[in-house]
Image (cartoon, rainbow, N blue to C red):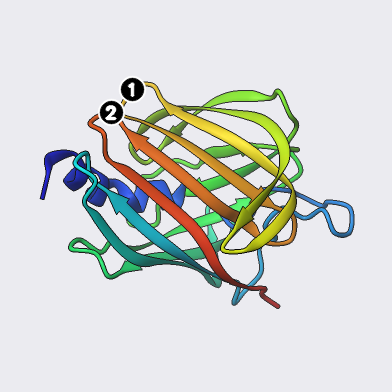
């Protein structure tokens, strides 16, 4: 495996985790960008493209599995895993939200500190810095636009761009109301690329 493609494989878990199923708090009806609910499930085509153009095509899964209490706060366990790649990460972390932000807590680290993943509400032009699983990141909301994925058009998606402070990668993602992330395109410094595209979304209860 090429070094850049190996890097992509080893960091895919962190990149998937940066696309939470919940990005808005108490929205107007029909405007809930990725609501958080038990049983909610997202299935995506996951394509790794090496610097030489070689591809690995698999699937990425994201599922909200149960509510848990940590440090006096209620979180939802968020399970992420891939299938069909040479390296297939499988892990969980804890998510919660309020009217100001979306938060993440690493479940497998006893001393982990809650981090802000996303500043709410989403608004074109907003920008913030935050700590991700693989370093410091800066995210900017670029615009609202329609995007077509696998033959289906999703309207009024928020297009965000996240740039790693160390220059290791840049991620563009599109979040659709009522669904969540429908497309994500991450380009690595070494030339590798990871493309995620929604196949199926099942709302929770």
Image spot of residue 106 (x, y percent): 40, 51
Position of residue 11 measured from the top left corner of the image (x, y, whole percent): 28, 46
Q: Which residue is mark 2?
A: 189
Whether residue 109 is visible here, answered yes or no, is: no
Q: Compared to 141, does 33 lie above or below?
A: below
Residue 129 in the image: state x and y as whole percent: 52, 24
Q: Residue at x 59, y 53 (%)?
A: 181
* Quarter of the rendering occupied by the C terminus: bottom right
Q: Residue at x 69, y 25 (%)?
A: 126
Residue to which mark 1 is pinned = 167
Q: Secondary structure at mark 1?
A: loop
Q: CA distance from mark 2 to mark 1?
A: 7 Å
Q: Position of residue 28 (x, y in %)?
A: 89, 53
Task: Establish if 166 lies above or below 11.
Answer: above
- Mark 1 packing: few (<14 Cα in 10 Å), some, or many (20+)? few
What's the residue at 67%, 57% (across, down)?
34
Res 5 → quadrant:
top left
Closer to us: mark 2 or mark 1? 2
When asked about the image quadrant of residue 127, the answer is top right
Observer-nearest residue: 103 or 167? 167
Circles 2 and 1 in contact, beta carbons < 8 Å: yes
Q: Is residue 48 left or right of residue 178?
A: left
Q: Secondary structure at mark 2?
A: loop
Q: Crowding at label 2, few (<14), some or many (≥20) Cα neighbours within 10 Å? A: few
Nearest to the observer: residue 152 or residue 20: 152
- Whether residue 115 appears in this view of the structure is yes
Q: Which of the numbered marks, if any, corresponds to residue 9?
A: none
Picture mark count: 2
Q: Nearer the viewer, residue 19 or 201?
A: 201
Earlier in the chain: of badge 2 and badge 1, it is 1
């Amino acid at each position: 495996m090429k070094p850049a493609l190996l890097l992509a494989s080893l960091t895919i878990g962190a990149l998937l985790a940066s696309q939470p199923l919940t990005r808005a708090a108490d929205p107007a009806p029909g405007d809930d960008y990725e609501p958080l609910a038990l049983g909610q499930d997202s299935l995506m085509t996951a394509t790794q493209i090496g610097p030489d153009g070689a591809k690995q095509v698999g699937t990425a899964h994201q599922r909200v599995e149960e509510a848990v209490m940590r440090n006096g706060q209620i979180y939802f366990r968020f399970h992420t895993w891939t299938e069909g790649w040479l390296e297939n990460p499988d892990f969980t972390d804890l998510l919660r939200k309020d009217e100001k932000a979306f938060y993440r807590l690493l479940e497998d680290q006893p001393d982990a500190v809650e981090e802000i993943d996303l500043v709410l509400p989403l608004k074109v032009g907003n920008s913030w810095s935050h700590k991700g699983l693989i370093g410091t990141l800066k995210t900017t909301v670029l615009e609202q636009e329609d995007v077509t994925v696998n033959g289906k058009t999703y309207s009024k998606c928020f297009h965000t761009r996240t740039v790693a402070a160390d220059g290791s990668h840049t991620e563009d993602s599109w979040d659709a109301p009522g669904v969540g992330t429908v497309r994500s395109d991450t380009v690595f410094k070494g030339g590798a690329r990871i493309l995620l595209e929604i196949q199926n979304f099942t709302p929770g209860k």
